[in-house]
Image (cartoon, rainbow, N blue to C red):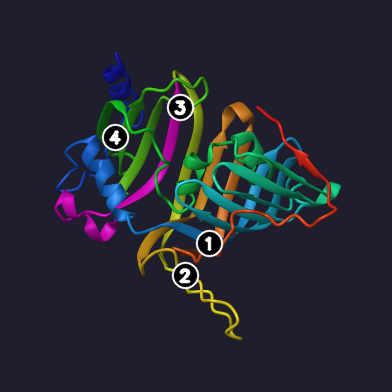
Amino acid sequence: MRALGCLFAAGLFAVGCTSFAPPKSPLPDAKSAVARLDATYAKVTGIRGNAKIDYLGEKGRVKGELKLLASAPDKLRIGISASVVGSAGEVASDGVRFWADDKANGRYIIGLAKPCNIARITQVPLASRELVPMLWGMRPDLPQKVTCDSVKWNGDGGFYVVALGHETTSSTEPKLHELRMTPWPEDLDKPWGEQRMRLLGVLAWRDDALVYRVTMADHQKTATAKAIVDPDGLSDDVLPSGPDVEVDVPRKIHVEVPAKKSDVIFKYEEAFVNPPLPKDVFKLYMPPGVPVEEATCD
């Protein structure tokens, strides 16, 4: 039944008239597809960027600007205009704890790095290990044990649909992830083992319910960030967190979480991979005397 579920999910996007022929050397199976995607982004540790955020929520559609720093698999720091989206001006998470600067109420909020807490500023109620890698076009950090898998070419869209089913004891985590991917245009005629992959989207399912949908577009070649250098020589240089690379990064990322009525679009205006990571950059400094509140949410 699990195998049939995966095969059915992979076939959801294979209906219609074929308009895109598969690569001459097609991916043989789902394991190989994931391996090629992982190899494409193997030297990417994270991303730093400036972006526009477009959020559809209870107050309608609102827009703002943000500065983002993310590091695999689950570290995140985002600053955003507090008057536009939410009350937090900045949020940071080391994957275990989170800190938020609630400028509107003159306080700091701290707590566990749960999706509902991270969403105070990102507006995306997803676990960090799911969200963070997708911010530079990589797949979410998936469970290791796969119970079923399948791969199918979607001729209508010109991409593979890779379905990966997992065992989970959580009542909220997805049981099935669908990855939509396609080779880099310049790699279409190469053997499949040499093809670099571009992720176009991720769908996550829990039984028959869609947990989230992420659509990635406007991919552009993106280079490694430069080192942070103190012009006065008083502090040590902070080198990039990874090697010099050039990799496709989606400049538009659309995240939908239907159950939470969350609909967010990120559009990078500037982006670099493998950014320098100063010490404690994924924590917020809380000045003495400012009220601190422990956050509890579900």
Q: Is residue 102 magenta?
A: no
Q: Answer whether residue 202 is magenta in the image.
A: yes
Q: Residue at x 49, y 74 (%)?
A: 227
**Which residue position is annotated with label 4?**
17
Image quadrant in which the N terminus is located: top left
Left/right placement of residue 51 relative to residue 7 reads: right
Task: Assign a secondary structure to mark 2.
Answer: loop
Three-letter amino acid code at the position of disc 2: Ala
Mark 2–mark 3 distance (CA, rounded to whole Å): 33 Å
Q: Nearer the viewer, residue 74 or 84?
A: 74
Q: Which residue is the site of mark 2?
A: 225
| Mark sitting earlier along the chain (1/3) | 1
- Check disc 1 and report its element: helix, strand or loop: strand
As measured in the structure, the alpha-carbon distance from the residue carrying label 2 to the one carrying label 4 is 43 Å
Nearer the observer, disc 4 or disc 1? 1
Report which residue position mark 1 lands on: 48
Residue under the image location 28 percent in, 18 percent down: 4
Q: Nearer the viewer, residue 196 or 217?
A: 196
Q: Which residues are magenta?
A: 184-206
Check whether the beta carbons of the residues at disc 2 and disc 1 lie within 8 A of each other.
yes
Residue appearing at x 28%, y 39% in the figure: 155
User: Can see residue 260?
Assistant: yes
Tell which tag, 2 or 4, sits nearer the viewer: 2
Q: Give the residue at the far top of this rendering.
A: 1
- Compare marks 2 and 3 and give the one earlier in the sequence: 3
Where residue 174 is drawn, which disc sits there? Answer: 3
Q: Which numbered disc, 2 or 1, marks the residue that appears first in the sequence?
A: 1
Q: Amino acid at mark 3?
A: Pro
